[in-house]
Amino acid sequence: MAAKGEPPRSFSQLLAVVLFVLSAVSLVTAVVLPFSRLTQTDAVVRLNVAPLESHLVLETAPGLPEGVALAPTSEEGLTVDAVANPDGSDEVPPAGLRLLGALGTSVWGLALALIAFLLGRIVFTVGRGDPFNPANPVRFIAMSLTVIIGSLAADTLNWLAASAFYDHYSLQPPLEVVAYYSWTPILLGALVLILAEAFRSGRHLARDTEGLV
Amino acid sequence: MPDVICHLDALLTARGMTLADLARQVGVTQVNLSVLKNNRAKAIRFSTLTAICDVLEVQPGDIFTVE
């Protein structure tokens, strides 16, 4: 219950609280995931499938070693999830391989935690009626860099994990490892940089009209 | 830097007007006029100044002096 004289919480402030919770959940997940992978006995990486051979790969991938299985993904025909020791009855993959398979997701989780925290702080200032707080442009720039760097780091780690898995189990075409970097986070980061500039200009305008009657 | 002093208080007293009356006739909030009256304003719009001069039948120099 709000104290006497305290303004009621606005929708923005409630949204800020939701973002802080999301940030905390992402942080915990990102930290716990690598440790969780170490306690499990399988390793999972995503591999690409050579074009025109996707219809064959799940059933008859040549040279697929014992203890490695393939599972379809949402990008059917383009990628597959390669799982080492899927039922726990074969040789347990090395700890490094199990850990590497989870690091990309973990790094992206850390980035998401930071992004949600910064966005929460921005939304909180908006709810307080202070959208052009001098810290907000800095927060937007930090969000932009986090989106770009987090995405590049996660994609690189996923590629490293897939390469290590491919080499360790001596996999062969049509399975292949392709470094894949998405443009979407880079464009999103650029968009957030534009927002940072807009808020910086808004701060100047707000300062210009301060005390104007 | 010299200070701009607002004489709105004296002008209102001389005319027996309240700040609320002036705010209503000028078309700005009483809060903004209070800021102006207490020398806390950093700038004034020409439209506000013209409206105050119109209502009080004075010139800008009667409202403000620089010290």
Image (tube, coloured by chain):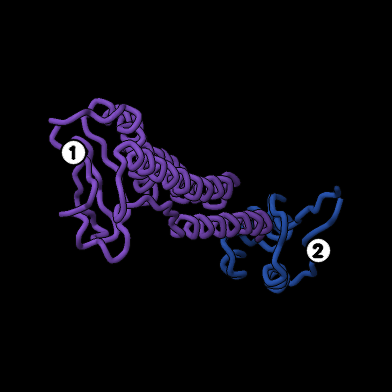
Quadrant of the image containing the N terminus of chain A = top left
Nearest the eye: B27 or A88: A88
- Is A166 left, or right, of A64 in this rendering? right
Residue type at the position of mark 2: Asp
Numbered badge on residue B62: 2
Numbered badge on residue A66: 1
- Is A152 left, or right, of A44 in this rendering? right
For label 2, count other residues whose C-alpha is less than 10 Å away and answer few (under 14), some (14-19) or many (20+): some
Question: Quarter of the image holding residue A117?
Answer: top left
Chain seen in purple: A
Q: Image height check: is B32 above or below A88?
A: below
For the question of whether residue A64 can be seen, the reply is yes
Establish whether labels 2 and 1 are both on one chain.
Answer: no
Q: Are marks 2 and 1 in contact (CB under 8 Å)?
A: no
Nearest the eye: A29 or A138: A29
For the question of whether residue A3 can be seen, the reply is no
